[in-house]
Image (cartoon, rainbow, N blue to C red):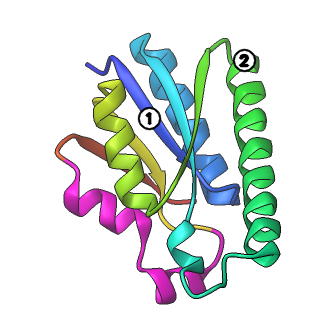
Amino acid sequence: MFGTVLAALDGSPRSEVALAKAIDEARLWKASLHAVYVIETGLFSSIPLDNTWEVIFGLLESQGKEALKAAEQKAAAAGVTITPHMAQGHAGSEILTLAKKVGADLIVVGSHGKSNIDRLLLGSVSSYVVKYSTITTLVVRS
């Protein structure tokens, strides 16, 4: 039923649960699996473009690389190959853009990200994806 699965990661425990579900779905359907980590650059629009921005971006990029590497290891342990992607911008929009680009027919996201404050400040990425996605979207609660 599903040929390409996209898992959205943010390094939170909920996204790890979502990744596990995405791995299960990819294995079940013998689907290709992609994972995306989005650096939310919109959060820092009021920060001057100087060394501060570079330091923050570097930290976020490092976290993303670690999350994607951990995802690759977890998938490999389950016998699934994963294609990692790093993006920057609005997380919900970038997830949907990548889903279209890779031809995903299932998006798997955690019910919310790193903190509940993210939901208050940014709105929920999972809510955005569910609202605007034209393909099946699985929101995983833990």
| Relative to 73, residue 91 above or below | below
- Whether residue 57 is situated above or below residue 94 in the rendered picture: below
Q: Position of residue 24 (x, y in %)?
A: 53, 27
**Numbered circle sitting on residue 6:** 1
Give the residue drawn at x 33%, y 17%.
3
Q: Which quadrant would the N terminus be assigned to in this image? A: top left
What residue sits right under mark 2 in the picture? 76
Q: Image quarter for residue 79?
A: top right
Q: Check disc 2: other Cα within 10 Å, few if <14, some if 14-19, many if 20+.
A: few
Measuring from the top left, give residue 68's x and y in whole percent: 70, 38
Spatial CA distance of label 1 from label 2 is 16 Å
Looking at the rendering, the stretch of residues picked out in magenta corresponds to 114-133
Q: Is residue 9 magenta?
A: no
Left or right: residue 55 compared with residue 19? right
Specify the farthest residue to the left: 134
Element under disc 2: helix
Residue visible at 32% across and 47% down? 96
- Element carrying mark 1: strand
What mark, if any, has residue 25 been given in the picture? none
In the image, what residue occupies the spot 75% across and 76% down?
50
Q: Quadrant of the C terminus?
A: bottom right
Q: Residues within 10 Å of mark 1 (few under 14, many from 20)?
A: many
Task: Report the front residue among 31 and 95.
Answer: 95
Residue lying at 81% horizontally and 61% vertically, measured from the top left: 59
Question: Is residue 123 or residue 89 the one in the foreground?
Answer: 89
